[in-house]
Image (tube, rainbow, N blue to C red):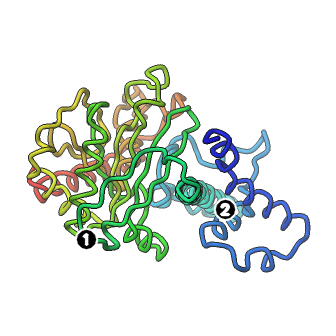
Amino acid sequence: MINKLENKEKGAGQSKVEEYISRIKGGESKEGILDGLPESFRSAIEAGLVTPPEESPQEMPIVPPQYEGLPTDLLEEFMVVKEYIGDPEKTQREKERKRRAVEYVREKERKQSEQEEISINEGERIEEVRESMGLPLSVEPVPETVAATTYSEFKLSSGETDEGAFWHQYRNEAAKELKESGKFEWGKERIYFDVGVADMIKLRNIVIRIASENNIPIAFKFMDAVKTTPAQRDGKETRFVANFASEDDAKIFFDNLKQNLEYQSLLPDRNIDYKGIRLDKMAEYASGYREARGALERIMSGVQNNDGTYSYQSESGRSITIPEDQYNSFKNSYNEMQAKINKTKQEWGV
């Protein structure tokens, strides 16, 4: 019965979004369809109605290869458009190409965020339905041990990734309220934990207690070690990650976490580089620059050629060659990022 419910409910939200998009494209009133829908559905429908610009085989890629993997803010910074004196049309074409590239990446980032939110909301709804029907939840909730507040009231969401891994997510009401007001962004401020598979439930309980007692908005996600078989893991999969509204919240959380005796007793069984700041034997802080750091590190691994240019492997494995001045521009940004990381390490006391 449970499996039938899961199969029926899983993906129902996304199916409705696709249905609404199809109806609007078919001529129905967008305002009429959007009226009364939850904000997560409205945003997903709006995003789905935006069609990324298509490229013909003869045109260059939307995002030039040397900028692959860069987030929107860095793409805007590095994709400099030259003024071609005597050829204003070429200048305009290059400006338009940059505009399309930035919009393409921005839309991609927005869709990823919206799909994440739809998945969370749908998972929470499924668990509420199961509970109302007297069915067991995907994973047992933590016993109530602190006074009920928006920081201690957690909703459970469970699901499956495209790779077949299963996960559980908890989000307190405070985080949900901030998300709805645009002040909580998944993945911007996070702490990864290389906790041993057998200790993930223990860490879950610790995280909930610390967030509840210290009034910290939080959403965290961890792998289901029973449903996710060893064959579905590559050794580098994310096992446990906690997300925060700000760096200050993340720091307050960790300052309290590291004093917890039960947390101190947990042991990692691996050490993954998340392109962030290692806090202890198990935790690593990775703010919004994580993705940018990975892209810049690939460029910094480049080798200088005899003509002064630099060649490196892009995110997709292509060999990219860029002029020396562009390489130096990337290098300056990389050095600035490293300086910021070193400053953050001092602030965190690591």
Q: Residues within 10 Å of mark 1 (few under 14, many from 20)?
A: few
Give the residue number, with chain letter if any, for mark 2.
96
Seen at 57% across and 63% down, the residue is 83
Q: Is residue 207 above or below residue 176?
A: above
Q: Is residue 194 above or below residue 218?
A: above
Give the amino acid type for the residue marked by disc 1 in the picture. Answer: Ala
Residue 224 can be seen in this image: yes
Seen at 44% across and 68% down, the residue is 176
Q: Quick one: 275 or 95, which is closer to the camera?
A: 275
Labels 1 and 2: the sequence-earlier one: 2
Mark identifier at residue 147: 1
Give the quarter of the figure containing the N terminus: top right
Residue 86 can be seen in this image: no
Q: Is mark 2 on a helix, strand or loop?
A: helix
Q: Is mark 1 on a helix, strand or loop?
A: loop
Quadrant housing residue 59 = top right
Mark identifier at residue 343: none
Q: Position of residue 114 (x, y in %)?
A: 58, 60
